[in-house]
Image: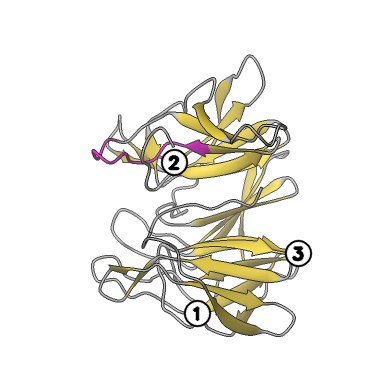
Amino acid sequence: MNESRADASSVVYNGQVLVTGGTSDDKIIVSSIEQFSRNPNPLIPPCWSYFSFNLPKALNGHRSVLYNDRMFVIGGYDEEKKKYSNMIYEIQLRFPFTTKVLAKLPSSTHMIGCGVILVNDKILIFGGRDCQSKTTAKVTMYDITMNTFQELAPLPYKVFNMATVNFGENVVLVGGSDQFYFVDAKSTVVSYNIKTQKSAMLPPMKHTRSQCCAVVDGNSLVVMGGIKHGAVALNSVEAFDFRSSKWRSLPSMKEARRTFIAEIV
């Protein structure tokens, strides 16, 4: 990328990866957005470029989801106000690239290190912690069309800094921690059914991981990096087969990473 970024957020829009905000290598929180584009001509390599607009705020630790031609940016640390945001911003990804405040999160919603998934026209917010380091098991649903919030059945345990992915009618939450000052990384994996609001425990990972990253590729859940007990960064990668319910190790990343993002394009 043109800038180093940690705690950034991303969406895939028209086959391009948009990476928003984050903390640069000189510890500055940025508002810029970069896009990763592939040229139809295979002789021209893919490239990174700055998008046509920036986030409305310099943010890190925020979450983003794509809804039609709009990107919703949820929470994050607001560099200008020096505190965590309770806003959901709506950004139009087509000209004239308008931005507005879509909603304010309920005070009971913990946004630090939460998991966020878009399901149809609803945004689901899982777990997280508040500024007093209190971790929660709450699940909050925001209905985009009705502009309303609803609290759903909670997770079976308190957790934040987990990886969160969508698989069919289920949201899968991987690893994470329930402590802030002393990292207590988890190997647990839970599947949350969107319709029934019931949780089911899946076989645990081979490694404990917090601040890890995950993607779903077909019937495989691929989990990468993160930190283990003692805040040691990991470069290991493992995959869970939903059909066999078994984990297997994959080749490691070239470097250890945490608080990073991944997309399949």
Question: Residue 257 location in percent, x, y?
Answer: 38, 59
Tag in front: 1 or 2:
1
Q: Which residue is the site of mark 1?
A: 188
The alpha-carbon separation of the residues under discs 2 and 3 comes to 29 Å
The alpha-carbon separation of the residues under discs 1 and 3 comes to 20 Å
Q: Which mark is residue 168?
A: 3
Q: Which residue is the site of mark 2?
A: 86
As for residue 11 lying within the magenta part, the answer is no
Residue at left 43%, top 65%? 225
- Quadrant of the rendered image containing residue 65: top right
As for residue 26 lying within the magenta part, the answer is yes
Would residue 81 be found to the left or right of residue 163 on screen?
Answer: left
Question: Residue 196 location in percent, x, y?
Answer: 74, 70
SS at mark 3 in the image: loop
Mark 1 residue type: Thr
Prevailing secondary structure of the magenta residues: loop
| Image: magenta residue range | 19-28
Residue at left 38%, top 65%? 135
SS at mark 1 in the image: loop
Mark 2 residue type: Asn
Query: Circle 3: is it few (<14), some (14-19), or many (20+) Cα within 10 Å?
Result: few
Is residue 46 shown to the viewer in this render?
yes
